[in-house]
Amino acid sequence: ASAWSKVPQGPPSISTDTCTGISEAFKADSHPEKILLGAGAYRDDQGKPYVLPSVKAAELQFVNSGLDKEYAAITGVADFVKAATKLAYGADSAPLKSGSISATQSISGTGALRIGGAFLERFYPGTKKIYIPTPSWANHGAIFEDSGLEVGKYRYYNKDTIGLDFQGMVEDIKTIPKGSIVLLHACAHNPTGIDPTKEQWKEISKAVKEGEHQVFFDMAYQGFASGDTDADAFALRQFIKDGHKPILAQSFAKNMGLYGERAGAFSVVCESAEEKANVDSQIKILVRPMYSNPPIHGARIAAEVLTNPALNKQWLGEVKGMADRIIKMRALLQDNLEKLGSKRDWSHITSQIGMFAYTGLTPEQVATLAKEHSVYCTKDGRISVAGITSGNVKRLAESIYKVTG
Ligand code: PLP
């Protein structure tokens, strides 16, 4: 018998509830005006993938410059790591200035989370259990379980208000065992698009402090949420001001459109430069047997975009352009629904932020949308706002109106 004859088929939910599953159904649909709202990637107003002009310019600059393809260090392209941490923590960050942040390049955001999981599993002195929001990005649970951590949940989404269950969240953070690990989405919470306000972040910081928890920020959308990279780093920086020592996963997939280039960073805020040196050494020991060293192409591009003043300015404009298009599509969708006379309150569409909107549509309504209107989104009613364009928003609103009455 084959060595793999006992390998069972994975559960179908892995493909039918997710972006990949809907893409397949979308492809098979022959409706000329079908709409796909699944993709976790930005699309322009023509519905096309978008390569940022600043990214293209940076790439062209070094493609012809005769750079070799030698390996990067275990921790990656040094200029990139330095620029990435500066972007996240801010140029005037105290731990950055005192040289107490340990950082390494990672295989995008997922890789950063995975290194974080492995680091916690090996070195976290408390109970190795990480609490993630309900709901959270679908991959979080799997990443941390595969890292050998236990995964718990805290309340986040309130389906009655289609908003944040702030009270539940804070209550849970206060009642989980002292010294737990808490994962927070730094901005543009995926999948709900619902973020705490600044005042709420301060309360959350207090609750985390009270619980003596270790905080892990996942920042996959810096700049992409509000259009301002500093504004989107508010939570991370507030926690540091409040005396926390976060660990952080960063991704340049969305804010630079570097999806497949896999450029990201993982960092740990340490107590001192000595502690940082110890953590540095252990991260190298973790990374080396996992993948030796990370890919260089995307990191070189991101480094150039972050450190070349002219390109950096251009990039900030382009990030804002993407965020603004998303914000505009939210407004248009809400507007169109209201014009059709929908009696529902659709204000959550514009109060939510980032690539995704949680519409509050039921699984049945989502199924009808696909079957009768050729509009595809995930079963949880999450739509990728990036899939909305000036050209399809009207038909989308009409379809949603028809299935919600
Ligand atoms: N974290 C969150 C919340 C995400 O939504 C994503 C991507 O969708 C990621 C992390 C990681 O993405 P990547 O590995 O492409 O950087």
Image: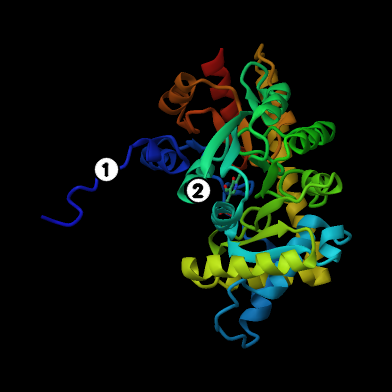
| Residue 212 horizontal/vertical position (percent) | 73, 39
- Please say if 108 is above or below 335: below
Give amino acid for label 1.
Gln
State how the image is colored: rainbow
**What's the residue at 82%, 69% (across, down)?**
310
Label 2 Cα crowd, 10 Å radius (few <14 / some 14-19 / many 20+): many
Residue 92 seen in the figure: yes
Residue tagged by mark 2? Answer: 143
| Residue 201 horizontal/vertical position (percent) | 79, 36
Give amino acid for label 2.
Ile
Residue at the extreme front? 125
Front of the two marks 1 and 2: 2
Ligand 1 within 8 Å, label 1 CB: no
| Residue 57 horizontal/vertical position (percent) | 69, 71
Q: Mark 1 vs mark 2: which is more N-terminal? A: 1
| Residue 241 horizontal/vertical position (percent) | 86, 47
Residue at the extreme bottom? 66
- Res. 167 image quadrant: top right
**Image position of 341 (left or right of 387):** right
- Please say if 182 is above or below 336: below
Which image quarter is the C terminus in? top right
Q: Secondary structure at mark 2?
A: helix
Residue tagged by mark 1? Answer: 9
**What's the residue at 57%, 47% (across, down)?**
47
- Res. 393 image quadrant: top right
Closer-to-camera residue (28/299): 299
- Res. 297 image quadrant: bottom right
**What's the residue at 48%, 45% (across, down)?**
145
Label 1 Cα crowd, 10 Å radius (few <14 / some 14-19 / many 20+): few
**Image position of 256 (left or right of 378):** right
Q: Secondary structure at mark 1?
A: loop
